[in-house]
Image: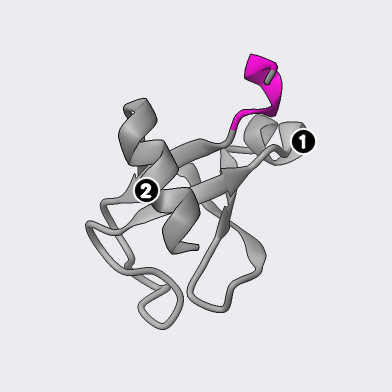
């Protein structure tokens, strides 16, 4: 799998204004969205199961081990 196609993961560090959609300390899978990133936003799969834009300041990017990445895929 090419690096550009690998899913990015973020942990929510601030859900102010998005309490119904984001859970603090939860890991979210992000979808690639270059335009959103240029505007300081990230597109994540939120509690609705859909990809929505949120301010990047709500998240911190994380790197998962292959084992953790596989576990998240299986849990989805």
Measured as percent of width and height from the top left, residue 22 is found at 39, 69
**x and y percent of residue 35 in the render?**
77, 35
Residue 57 seen in this snapshot: no
Q: Would you say residue 4 sits in the magenta stretch? A: yes
Task: State which region is magenta.
Answer: 2-6
Disc 2 vs disc 1: Cβ atoms closer than 8 Å? no
Q: Residue furthest right?
A: 35
Question: Where 50 sits versus 72, above or below?
Answer: below
Residue lying furthest bottom: 20
Front-lying residue, 71 or 20? 71
Q: Which mark is residue 65?
A: none
Q: Nearer the viewer, residue 72 or 7?
A: 72
Cα separation between marks 2 and 1: 29 Å
Task: Report whether 65 appears left or right of 44.
Answer: left
Residue identifier under label 1: 35
Regarding mark 1 in the picture, which secondary structure is present there?
helix
The image quarter containing residue 23 is bottom left
Q: In this view, does 23 lie above or below 1?
A: below
Q: Is disc 1 surrounded by few (<14), some (14 to 19) or many (20+) residues within 10 Å?
A: few
The answer to whether 7 appears left or right of 64 in the picture is right
Quick check: is 29 in the magenta stretch? no
Rendering coords of residue 63 (x, y %): 35, 27
Q: Is residue 54 visible?
A: yes
Along the horizontal axis of the image, is 36 left or right of 56?
right
- Point out which mark residue 71 bears: 2
């Amino acid at each position: 799998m090419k690096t550009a196609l690998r899913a990015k993961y973020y942990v929510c560090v601030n859900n102010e204004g998005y309490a119904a959609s984001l859970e603090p300390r939860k890991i979210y899978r992000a979808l690639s969205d270059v335009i959103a990133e240029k505007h300081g936003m990230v597109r994540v799969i939120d509690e609705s199961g859909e990809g929505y834009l949120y301010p990047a300041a709500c998240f911190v990017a994380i790197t998962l081990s292959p084992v953790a990445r596989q576990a998240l895929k299986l849990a989805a």
